[in-house]
């Protein structure tokens, strides 16, 4: 295979990596907020359940979570729904790995939602209570204070840790190959196994570096736009 053919073959896998990245952000970022509110709830039961869930998800390796999501339904209930989904989409639409990708998306979304929730919680709790009290003096409701006073400050404070998690996410997509999802690392492994070509495995790093560089520029600009909220 020529260099361009290898690049095109790896790009097919990187598209799957980008799909996992995009859907995880789309689901994980908003889902983290209600989890954060539950972790700060005045109701002890809600708070305890939320904190235990976050503790479990953050404590178990993401690869193991992917295995749990993909294999446990079949082991416990004798219903390998993701395998059935793979077969259904392949036979009817010619799409391979559909069920595996869905399992990965579920695992990634839950995992990163819990990480994002802790970032949200830390950002919200970092705002001094005096700002809430000042808002009450001005006659604002709690929701108005949060929307108009607190939220923009929280966003500015959580951008750096969120940026780190987002950059980590694109690299974590490589874990999808643990259940044979054809992301870029899996594509490179196939070349090594079938074509005895090892260098494409190292070449995948170029794809990650370029995308992380683009993310770094975009997130850096976003952080600069919010810099006027700094005290």
Image (tube, grey):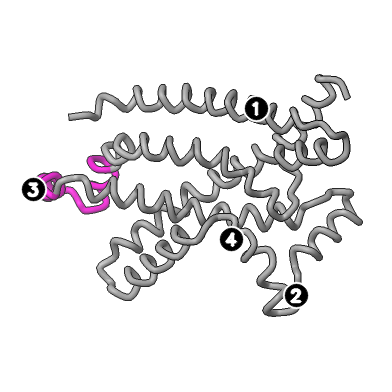
Image side of residue 225 versus residue 3, left or right: left
- Asked whether the residues under the numbered discs 4 and 3 touch, taking CB atoms below 8 Å apart as contact, a structural biologist would say no
Query: Which comes sooner in the sequence, label 2 or label 1?
Result: 2
- Relative to the observer, which residue lies in front, 184 or 195? 195
Query: Which comes sooner in the sequence, label 4 or label 2?
Result: 4
> Which residue is identified by label 3?
137
Q: Main secondary structure of the magenta part?
A: helix
Judged from the image, the secondary structure of the residue bearing numbered disc 1 is helix
Q: Measuring 10% from the left and 45% from the top, which residue is drawn there? A: 134
Rendering coords of residue 141 (x, y %):
20, 52
- Asked whether the residues under the numbered discs 4 and 2 touch, taking CB atoms below 8 Å apart as contact, a structural biologist would say no
Q: CA distance from mark 4 to mark 2?
A: 19 Å
Image side of residue 13 versus residue 160, left or right: right
Judged from the image, the secondary structure of the residue bearing numbered disc 2 is loop
Within 10 Å of disc 2 (Cα), the crowding (few <14, some 14-19, many 20+) is few
Image side of residue 223 versus residue 13, left or right: left
Judged from the image, the secondary structure of the residue bearing numbered disc 4 is helix
Query: Which comes sooner in the sequence, label 1 or label 4?
Result: 4
Q: What's the mark number on residue 207?
A: 1
> Which residue is identified by label 4?
64
Q: CA distance from mark 1 to mark 4?
A: 25 Å
């Amino acid at each position: 295979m020529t260099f361009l053919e290898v690049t095109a073959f790896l790009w097919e896998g990187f598209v799957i990596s980008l799909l996992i990245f995009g859907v995880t952000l789309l689901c994980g970022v908003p889902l983290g907020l209600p989890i954060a509110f539950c972790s700060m709830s005045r109701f002890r039961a809600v708070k305890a359940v939320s904190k235990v869930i976050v503790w479990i998800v953050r404590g178990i390796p993401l690869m193991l979570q992917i295995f749990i999501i993909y294999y446990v339904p079949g082991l416990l209930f004798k219903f390998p729904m993701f395998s059935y989904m793979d077969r259904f989409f392949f036979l009817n639409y010619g799409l391979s790995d559909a069920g595996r990708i869905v399992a990965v998306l579920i695992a990634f979304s839950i995992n990163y939602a819990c990480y994002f929730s802790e970032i949200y919680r830390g950002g919200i709790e970092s705002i001094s209570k005096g700002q809430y009290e000042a808002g009450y003096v001005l006659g604002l409701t709690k929701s108005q204070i949060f929307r108009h006073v607190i939220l923009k400050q929280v966003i500015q404070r959580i951008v750096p840790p969120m940026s780190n998690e987002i950059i980590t996410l694109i690299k974590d997509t490589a874990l999808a190959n643990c259940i044979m999802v054809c992301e870029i690392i899996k594509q490179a492994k196939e070349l090594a196994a079938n074509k005895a070509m090892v260098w494409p495995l190292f070449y995948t790093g170029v794809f990650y570096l370029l995308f992380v560089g683009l993310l770094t520029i975009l997130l850096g600009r976003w952080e600069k736009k919010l810099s006027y909220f700094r005290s």
